[in-house]
Amino acid sequence: MDIELLLKVQTFLARYAQIIDDDLLEEWPALFVETGRYVVTTDENFRRGFPIGMMYATSRAMLRDRIKSLRDANVYEAQRYRHILGAPLISPSDGGVLRVQSNFLVARIMHTGETTIFATGRYEDRVVAEGEALAFAERIVVLDSRQIDTLLAIPL
Amino acid sequence: MNVHHREWPPEGLTRVPYWIYSDPDIYAREQDRVFRGPIWNFLCLEAEVSEANTFRRSAIGDMQVVVTRDGDGELHAFENRCAHRGALLCLHEQGEAKEFSCVYHNWTYDLSGKLTGIAFRRGIGGKGGMPADAQPESQAPRKLRLTVFAGLVFGTCSDATPPIEDYLGPDISAKIRRVMRAPVKLMGGYSQMLNNNWKLYFENVKDTYHASLLHTFFTTFRLNRLSQKGGVVINESGGSHISFSIGDALSSKEYEQAKLRAAQDGFVLEAPEMLQSVDEFGDDVGLQILTVFPNFVLQQIRNSLAVRRVVPIGPERTELVWMAFGFVDDDDEMTERRLRQANLMGPAGYISMEDGAATGFVQRGVAAAKDFTSVVEMGGASVSSAESRVTEASVRAFWKHYRQLMDM
């Protein structure tokens, strides 16, 4: 077990959650490589090999568009998330690409104070080193449930 | 059922009373008169039960339904309820099966919903069991009448429901065929849980007036083509409609000019390939939203295709079940195009996420205003097709069909 690598990955994943939960969304695309993939899907789609995503991006530019639209175009009630992350499982490196799996629970806190468990699931990640830092080559958000309450505005 | 204390406002279709969205008596009457009435409910895509010995769960209002394809390739749909004590027979969303057996007491059914076996019917060793003249079949799950139209499976509980093409009318039939142009390939789905009455969502889809006002994605990124033509087509009953617009803003010269202005303001998409589309239907229609009363939406937003099924869960809660699709002859490039454009649809859709919020805002807004009404007067009192989409004609037409079924 490479403790140093585990700590590095865990810190990277924690930073991802912090960027979303603290509304630092403009920093979110930089956690991906230039041609990084980000897909939000359901466990049923994932198991059955269906490619659809609620969000589907294949580049940092698409992720930046997502955030710009969230800030300037889309209409939704003020809300924020709190990610609770599980410990990552890291598979042996394959050509410099780490396969990382981790669980999450996301609570959604509305401006009214109403807090609900909004989503649970797992991240299926492919992580690479970019210089000193890590970056997602791919992050697939696999939701346990097919049901999304009202809307999914902020990325998970 | 006591609903007669509820009178529709004298103004008629230009006023919708707010009690219609929460009254439990109305909800119960809808189950009987609308969902189990002389109408076609969308159940699923035929491609979801394409193989022999497969099933998928669906619903007709509150009624739980199983759609199956039997070993001979024949389609069936029946109520998901055991004849014995009424428990659900099928406990999975979809899958393979050669028969169904109720987990409670192991009564068995074939894929047509016919009761085929009763555990210990004759007792054990001459003791116990059911009398010889018992008729448990009399309480068998109801079988639905099915029709498959252009790859869409519809079901009805009523013998009075007209043939599907008569129900839809020629315009709606033609525009369904237009989209369902080839054998379907499923691309996956998800659900959006709406905290509002099902009718608020169905009105929302028919409301062509809100599109550019609520969904500001296209205008913010200057993607609206100024000269974009379109219209609304409403069928004779009023319950089903098509709204459409011509053209693809991205390929227009106006867009190139608008993009320059947008870039100066900082409102430009960095990855416009998300929206790059091809005219796969050969008619330059970039957007077609079609509804079939009371629970079906067929969506073509450029190359993003999907069916949506509206399922009432209670007076103030609705599940919207989405299934995206392409065609079996799609190449990889086409599939990728559809996946990128799918960013426009669903609970996270650039031009659809607001719908679930807006209809919830109405439900919350009218909580203490049961005796008030909405004002539905854009386009006057008309319930017919129009060239302008700045109209609420198809919303009024929905209520026309609804009131006729509800006898109110």
Image (cartoon, rainbow, N blue to C red):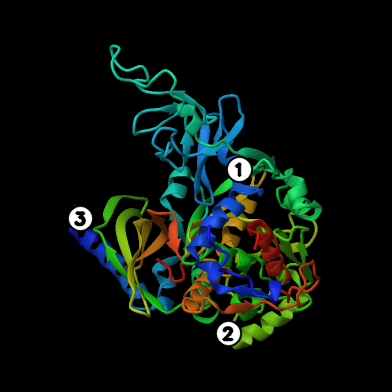
In the displayed structure, B397 sits above or below A123; it is below
Q: Chain of mark 3?
A: A
Q: Nearer the viewer, mark 2 or mark 3?
A: 2
Q: Is residue B324 something one can see in this rendering?
A: no
Q: How far across and down, in percent of the image, does residue B70 sit?
A: 56, 28
Q: Secondary structure at mark 1?
A: loop
How crowded pointer 2 is (Cα within 10 Å; few <14, some 14-19, many 20+) is rated as few
How crowded pointer 3 is (Cα within 10 Å; few <14, some 14-19, many 20+) is rated as few
Disc 2 from disc 1: Cα separation: 55 Å
Q: How far across and down, in percent of the image, does residue B313 sit?
A: 47, 57
Q: Chain of mark 1?
A: B
Q: Nearer the viewer, residue B307 or A86?
A: B307
Q: Is residue A127 something one can see in this rendering?
A: yes
In the displayed structure, B99 sits above or below B263; it is above
Query: If you read the primary sequence from the N terminus, does the residue marked by circle 2 or circle 1 appear first?
Result: 1
Disc 2 from disc 3: Cα separation: 45 Å
| Disc 1 target residue | B157
Q: Nearer the viewer, residue A100 or B320?
A: B320
| Disc 2 target residue | B266
Q: Secondary structure at mark 2?
A: loop
